[in-house]
Image (cartoon, rainbow, N blue to C red):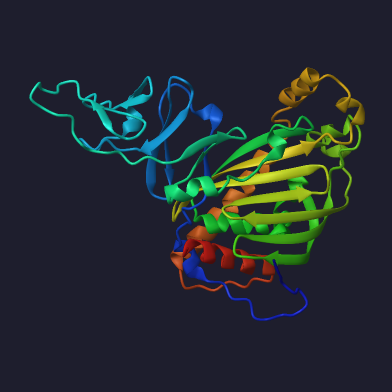
């Protein structure tokens, strides 16, 4: 891991052509929440690639290119029959392997078309559906991002969906730049962030900040701080953020862990899932209770930080989309940047995109 000195002050250069860079497809991407995929096919897009997800009769998930090779109609407009996908237009069916298995009007003297729909490795993990768009031979050698808090009974989750009309690099830079806590003063998330240390390699960037936190979850009632601002008090906490390509992870002290699972759609559109975990580790008496009750508490408190998280996301989206518009008006314009974490972040994006 390369450690970047914060004492020296070389000229900081931003590469604006990064706003058109693609993605490294040899990674697992979270493309949907598990609960989003029900009995009907689900259409998603991952970097210009239309993909249809569907569950077979056993509940297993399959992923195919979202196009029928007959008349180029979206397969996601069709229906699931057992483990096969039927096109809505003429009723052609395709196996999970992408092979055509049935044409309802096929003549006795005709053979099934030899057309093949592209398939993608897919798996269900941590409440999300993960897809590998790259070289299939590498899918088993690379793991999706671990989210151990998802099943852990000591963590309460809240999820906010991010949909912004901007290149994914703007979202990543927003997440890595903790100085923008200034934007969220009304929501009282964190304050006075100062970059203390920075390290990077070809797979990740880790930025270590010292900040002021409004929250301290040390008593059973203190989780109410997420709802009632009058209960919050500023105190110093470590604020660490990591861009672990292609996703983002953050921790604020010992009480909060946050993930952003990025879904780049194209050069001007990005989606993501922001997952906020509140820790209950301080409540040692709770840990002695039966597992069924602890799971009940975890499930009952799901979404307890929804208003806070949605408020932060909306403010960030407004800034990110404004940045994108400014770039489109003047692609050659140069901005002034003082946060070295963003330079390292751009370097990682460029390194991964050209692999």
In this rendering, the answer to whether 104 lies above or below 9 is above
Q: Position of residue 126 (x, y in %)?
A: 62, 35
The image shows residue 115 at horizontal and vertical percentages of 23, 38
Rendered residue at 37%/42% (across/down): 50
Q: Could you tell me residue 259's position as x and y percent?
A: 66, 45
Q: Tell me if residue 334 can be seen.
A: yes
Q: Is residue 12 left or right of residue 97?
A: right
Where does the image place residue 142, in percent across and percent down from the top left?
55, 49
Taking 192 as reference, is 321 left or right?
A: left
Residue found 10% across the figure and 22% down from its top: 107
Residue displayed at 67% across by 41% down: 147
Q: Picture quarter containing residue 261?
A: top right
Number of on-image labels: 0
Q: Quadrant of residue 348?
A: bottom right
Which one is nearer the viewer's eye here, 331 or 79? 79
Q: Residue at x 87, y 34 (%)?
A: 222
Figure check: 337 above or below 38? below
Outermost residue toward the left in this view: 109
Camera sees residue 264: no
Query: Could you tell whether 106 is left or right of 14 in the image?
Result: left
Q: Is residue 215 above or below residue 33?
A: below
Seen in the picture, residue 19 relative to 251 is either above or below; the reply is below
Q: Quadrant of the N terminus?
A: bottom right
């Amino acid at each position: 891991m390369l450690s970047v000195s914060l004492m020296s002050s070389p000229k900081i250069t931003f590469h604006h052509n990064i706003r058109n860079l693609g993605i490294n497809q040899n990674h697992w991407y979270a493309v949907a929440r598990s609960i989003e995929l029900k009995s009907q096919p689900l259409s998603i897009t991952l970097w210009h690639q239309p993909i249809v997800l569907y569950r077979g009769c056993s509940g297993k998930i399959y992923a195919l290119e979202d196009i029928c090779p007959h008349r180029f109609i979206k397969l996601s407009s069709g229906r699931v029959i057992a483990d096969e996908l039927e096109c809505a237009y003429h009723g052609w069916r395709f196996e999970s392997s992408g092979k055509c298995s049935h044409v309802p009007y096929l003549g006795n003297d005709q053979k099934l078309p030899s057309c093949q729909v592209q398939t993608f490795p897919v798996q269900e993990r941590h409440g999300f559906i993960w897809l590998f768009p790259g070289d299939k031979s590498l899918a088993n050698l690379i793991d999706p991002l671990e989210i151990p808090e998802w099943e852990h009974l000591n963590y309460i989750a809240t999820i906010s969906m991010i949909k912004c009309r901007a290149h994914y690099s703007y979202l990543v830079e927003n997440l890595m730049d903790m100085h923008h806590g200034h934007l969220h003063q009304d929501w009282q998330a964190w304050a006075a962030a100062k970059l203390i240390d920075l390290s990077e390699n070809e797979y990740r960037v880790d930025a270590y900040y010292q900040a002021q936190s409004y929250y301290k979850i040390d008593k059973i009632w203190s989780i109410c701080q997420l709802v009632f601002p009058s209960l919050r008090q500023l105190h110093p906490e470590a604020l660490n953020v990591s861009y672990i390509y292609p996703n983002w992870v953050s921790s604020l002290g010992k009480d909060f862990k946050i993930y952003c699972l990025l879904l780049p759609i194209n050069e001007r559109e990005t989606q993501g899932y922001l997952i906020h975990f509140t820790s209950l580790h301080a409540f040692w008496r709770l840990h002695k209770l039966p597992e069924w009750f602890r799971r009940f508490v975890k499930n009952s408190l799901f979404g307890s930080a929804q208003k806070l998280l949605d408020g932060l996301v909306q403010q960030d989206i407004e800034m990110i989309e404004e940045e994108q518009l400014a770039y489109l008006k003047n692609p050659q314009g140069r901005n002034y940047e003082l946060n070295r974490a963003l330079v390292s972040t751009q370097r990682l994006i460029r390194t991964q995109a050209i692999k």
